Amino acid sequence: MRISIGNDHAGPEYKHAIVTALQAKGHEVMNHGTNTSDSVVYPDFGHPVAIDVESGKADFGIVICGIGNGINMTVNKHQGIRAALCWTKEIAVLARQHNNANIISIPARFTAIPQAIDMVEAFLSTDF
């Protein structure tokens, strides 16, 4: 599976852990996120993920920011994007099952890294 990921300064550790977990399962990951905690503007990292998913370059997207809402609103401005802000595994599953979400938005300041990995795995393995 091809997955595009982007994050702002709140999510480098999350992104690294998620990318490591995804690559261990054989997924191809396109990284559009920052790798430092230096302050950045989240749309700069959300739009490329939405474009990857929108164009078919990626099967799914993952976006991460502090509360998850800002980057979620950014990617949802794109045609064909159905991004879901998720803070539990159950919400991630329901976002796929009921809404056919194609991008998961993770609030780094309100989830733990193991929880975020579980949400991503559930999101990617759940059918619409």
Image (spheres, helix red, strand yellow):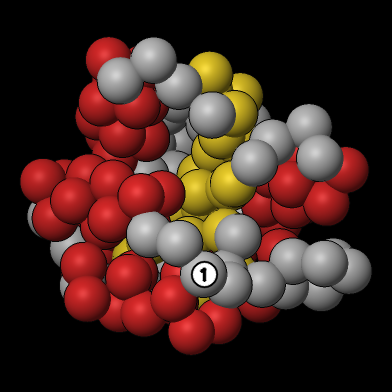
The residue shown at (60%, 36%) is 4
Place of residue 45 in the rendered image (x, y in percent of width and height, measured from the top left): 66, 44
Image location of residue 125, percent across then percent down: 35, 50
Q: Position of residue 94 (x, y in %)?
A: 36, 80
Q: Quadrant of the N terminus?
A: top right
Q: Is residue 122 above or below residue 1?
A: below
Judge the density around disc 1: few (<14), some (14-19), many (≥20) Cα neighbours within 10 Å.
few
Which residue: 45% across, 21% down?
Answer: 27
| Residue at the (81%, 40%) spot, across then down | 56
Which residue appears farthest toward the bottom when viewing the image?
Answer: 98
Residue placed most toward the observer, 105 or 121? 121
* 116 relative to 103 in the view: left or right: left
Residue 33 coordinates in the image, percent (x, y): 56, 34
Secondary structure under the numbered disc 1 in the rendered image: loop
Q: Residue at x 37, y 35 (%)?
A: 15
Could one spot residue 30 in this view of the protein?
A: yes
- Whether residue 105 is visible to the viewer of this picture, yes or no, is no
